[in-house]
Each structure stands twice: as structure tokens, then as C-alpha cells.
Amino acid sequence: MFTKTRFLIIRLSSIGDVLHSTPVAQALKIAFPDCHITWLVGQVPSSLLTSNPYIDELYIWPRERWETHMRRGQFKSAWKLWQKLQTDLESKHFDVVLDIHGLFLSGMIAAASKAPRRIGMDHTRELNWLFMNEIAPSSPQEVHVIQRYLSVLKPLGIHSKEYAMTLQLPEEAITFATDFLRDHGISKQDTIIAFNPGTTWPSKNWPTEYYAAVINSFKNNEPILLCGGPGEQKLGESIIQQLNRPIINAINQTSLLQLAALISQCSVLVTGDTGPLHMGIGLGIPTVSLFGPTDPQKFGPLTGKHIILEESMNCRPCHKKSCPLTHLNCMHSLSPERVIRAIQTVVHFQRLCNNKSKSYEVNGMNTPTAKITHLFHSGYAVETANHFLIFDYYQPVPGKNLSITEGIITSDYLKDKKNILVFVSHNHADHFDPAVIEWAKDNPEITYILSSDVEINTSQLNCHIVSAYEEVTAGQVRIKTFGSTDQGISFFVQLDGLSIFHAGDLNWWDWTGESLADRKAAEVNFKAEIAKIAEKITTIDIAFFPVDRRMEESYSKGADYFADQFKPKLLVPMHFGKDFDATTAFADKAKSLSIHTVEIHHKGQEIFFS
């Protein structure tokens, strides 16, 4: 239907929003490979799209110059720029316009194109809807701006959940970065930590003395890169004045693409909610992001290996450029120590995954950390400093890509792991995949912790068969089992300085269709089991607990109660199948309950815990 269709995408600015919009071009090109995509963009962020493989033509309009003419009353000059734009767009005979900017100006541009189909987003500002003849429906679950921008494709029959941003660098930018770092004595093998101290809003800036404290915590032989544009120059100078160690100062020494290329060579980027953060995410570089007045659920990393730091406060997120209360507590309350630990976590796992070392220390600090990977449903992998745990693995339809990025674990993948423990909470098909037993053929050192109701031949396995209320030691790992309110058991695991709880099918199963007596019994049984657990354990770092919207309004009753009783440092939702939106709904609810949780958006998603 859209084979030869000519599309115009309108997103004029800014750096972050342009990158957040790139999944739209990707999804459109994948759905209709033979279509033609033109992207209309302003001059400042345009270079970020020049190498985008999903865009056929880039139309760079000097919006900034047009707005300057308008502000200065130079209407003749502004009119010339507008006339040229209108003539150019009409000559290209676009079939469909996708306005993912949502302003009055972008609406005018859409109308000026004379395209017969003009699709806009729901709930836009400045009367943008007046210029559209179709409005894409939105969903309350589409919180993140990437999800919102992708919604514009719904009228075309495209419902994409591919959220990765596209940022490809030209060879000359990569060469610049390589030469720049080499000239400063940095090699590709070095662990480079980059800091971008400035943002476009004063309210989003972290104090310079905090940046200096973090940088000073690293040894002199740990390369530190200070980066940013001309707007960060004064901030950079303030930081440098407070340092007692050398750094590489690249502030105001690069173009936008050169800055991106430098970031691409780093091990981690530390910054606030600003353009370079999203450049790092688009390049696949792990980031530590500092959020205050803006909401990371809306603007933060949606994919990849990232740590978000924020404080829970009644006044945030306010989305104000200047603090309405003048105290800036949302940013100032983020301590340097938290940022140090977050950097430590990211670098630790990079080295762990590269088999370079078992731990990473900053001034003697060595905080227990874990990399969590969502597999599917209730299945998670947890990698700590010395162990690799797999809980309730289940893959109903493995698909073509047999990779951990799709939540698939294979025997080959496990060959590089050490001290592997596989946990099965019960014999239900959605918690026990027979594939886990096959892994032992190529990896005989695997230790299995199986619920007693799992009926298999264990003669060739290194295996512990357990029931509720037992204790098992497997090497340096201590395991306590507890009961379930359905089938099997739940697990409490202590290792490498961490305590981990996996609920299995332990939950407050409050089904709305059952009788009041049955629902009351479910409550009593659940709370009784929680009381037994509370007698034995007091501290939980990571908890995996069911969030199942088949129970409608009661979908998170069990998780809410569990979190209130034990206050885990991180509660990871599970037992939601393909209903990833359940985790978004729970995360939104969790804010008011002071529950620290995480949204799960896809199989293979990685979460870093520190």
C-alpha cells in the first residue's frame, strides 16, 4: 500500500528530541522498505542525521535564522526563507507528513507541504492540530517520548516497540576522536570516564563542586574526559579550578559529531538530562544520568546499560527551567558518593563481561553489584562479581535470534560464565523450561536448585532437590527456601554481599471472579507466608515479585504488600508474560508508594544494580 509513498518527517529540534525521533524513521523504513523518507530538521542538530541509514533525504531549514528575523521584526527576510521552504516542499510532492514536533510552526510547515495526509500527535501544544487531518491515538502507557513519537505511525498500521535510537558517525568524526585521544596519551584499551557538566536548563545542572569531588576520587592514571559545547565552558573552568588531578578538557573543542565520536570512545558518560546523554545512549555507551526537574520515565534511557540517579521529592518533576522554590534540592541532594558508586557499577560490569578483572575499586570502595537481564515472564538472569544465577527460565517461542538480547540462553552462551546456578521454583510450564536441563550436557559444572515437584531424572546433574523451609549451601552461596501460595517454593539467596528474593508463584492471588470467601482465604494465606519469611530475613537487596494484570485492579496487591513489609532496594516485576505495559503501570503506581522498581520493555533488557 505504501510501497512508493513519499513521507516527510518534521522534527526541527533539539538534539535529544531529534535522536528520540529516529526510531520513527527506522520503523517506517522497515515496514515499507521502498518508501522515500525526507526529514525536515533545523541546522543545529542536523549533523546527527546525516549518516542515518533510514533517511533518504535530509532537508535542513534554517529555523534558527528565521526565528531571529521574526524576533527582530525583519519580516521581509523571514518571508523569503518561508517562501523558499514552501516552494521546495511543494515540489517534492509528499504523500504523507508525520509531524512529531507538535508546534504551531511545525503544523504550518506540514500544511505548506500540500501533502494530502498530515498525521499529528495527540495532546500537542499551540493549536498544532488545526493543521492536521489525522491525529494518532495515544495510550496512557506510552509515557516515554520515544513511545509518544512512535504513536504517530499507528494510522499507518505500524505499532513498533523498537526503541533504540540511531546515531551513526562518519569516518572523519571517528578519526578525529582517535587522533584527539592519542594526542593526549589515551589508548583504546583505557577505561575513559567522560563528564558533560552542562545542560540547557540551570535547574538541571549538578553543582560543579560535586563533579570535582567525583573526579578527584579517581586515581591519576584513570583517564577523565571533560566534554561539552561552548555553553559548558564556564562550568568546566569552575570544575578544573577545584581539581587535584589531571584531566582532558575537550569542552568547546569539537563539533557536535566530533563530540559524539569522543563519547563513543568512552567507557561511561556522566551527565544530566541533556543532548549528549541521548547521544551516548544512541551510541550504545553506558551512562550515569542525573535527573532532577525532569522525569526519567519520560526522557531517560529506555534501552541499554544505563543507571539513572534521582531523588524522590514532592516537588519533582516540575519541568521548570529555573527552580520554582529556588533551592534546587532535587539536584543538590544527589551526593557525589552515589555517582561514584554508579560509575563503579558500570565499569565493574564492563570489566567483568570482558573478563578483565573481578572487581573495580574507587578509593577503596567496592560496593556489591549485579547485572540483571530479563529473559521472559518470571525468568531473570543475575550476574554478580563471582556467580551467574538463572531463575525460572521459560521461552515458549524461542524465535530466530538465539541470543541473550532476545532473552534466550544457550549452552554456548554459558560456556564463558562461571559458578552457574539454575533455580526452578515449581513445575508449571511457564516457570520450568526443560531446555535448562540440556545446558548441563555442555556445562556439567552447573548447579541446579529444583523444587521437589519438578519430576526429572537428576542422576547426571549437580543438583539440590528442595522443599519449602530448607537451607542449602552451594559453594559460597547460601539459599533459604520458603513456601508459595500456588505451587512450589520461593527462594532467598545470599552471595557476593547481595541478598536476592525470587517469589516463584508466591503472590496475593486475588482473582476478581472468585467468591469473597476464596479471595479472603487468598489474602490470609499470602500474609501468613509473608509473616514466616519475615521471621527469617530482614534485608533484601533485589526482589523479583509477580505483577500480573490478569487480576485486573488487584494486579499488584502482592507486590505492594511485600514491598511495604521488606522494603527491598529494588523490586523487579515478573510474571507478566508479554504484557510489558504492566511494568510501566506498576512503576507509575510505585512512585506514590516509595517502591524502587524498574520498567521492563523487552526481552533481553539489562538492569544494573548497585
Image (spheres, rainbow, N blue to C red):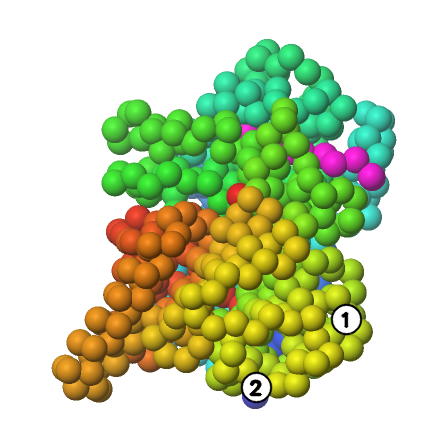
Q: Nearer the viewer, residue 272 or 459?
A: 459
Specify few, some or many for label 1: CA neighbours under 10 Å numbering under 14, 14-19, or 20 or more.
few
| Residue type beneath disc 2 | Glu
Specify few, some or many for label 2: CA neighbours under 10 Å numbering under 14, 14-19, or 20 or more.
few
Residue 428, percent from left and from top: 48, 84
Identify whether 401 is placed above or below 361: below
Give the CA separation, mark 2 to mark 1: 19 Å
Residue 157, percent from left and from top: 48, 82
| Image-based side of 386 in relation to 143, left or right | right
Q: Give the range drawn in magenta.
A: 188-198
Identify whether 610 is placed above or below 454: above
Label 2 sits on a secondary structure element that is loop
Q: Can residue 59 be seen in this view?
A: no
- Magenta region includes residue 286: no
| Residue type beneath disc 1 | Pro
Residue 530, percent from left and from top: 31, 62
- Magenta: main secondary structure equals loop
Residue 591, percent from left and from top: 31, 51
**Residue 444 image label:** 1
Q: Nearer the viewer, residue 113 or 429?
A: 429
**Residue 455 image label:** 2
On-image quarter of the N terminus? bottom right
- Magenta region includes residue 190: yes
| Image-based side of 488 in relation to 373, left or right | left
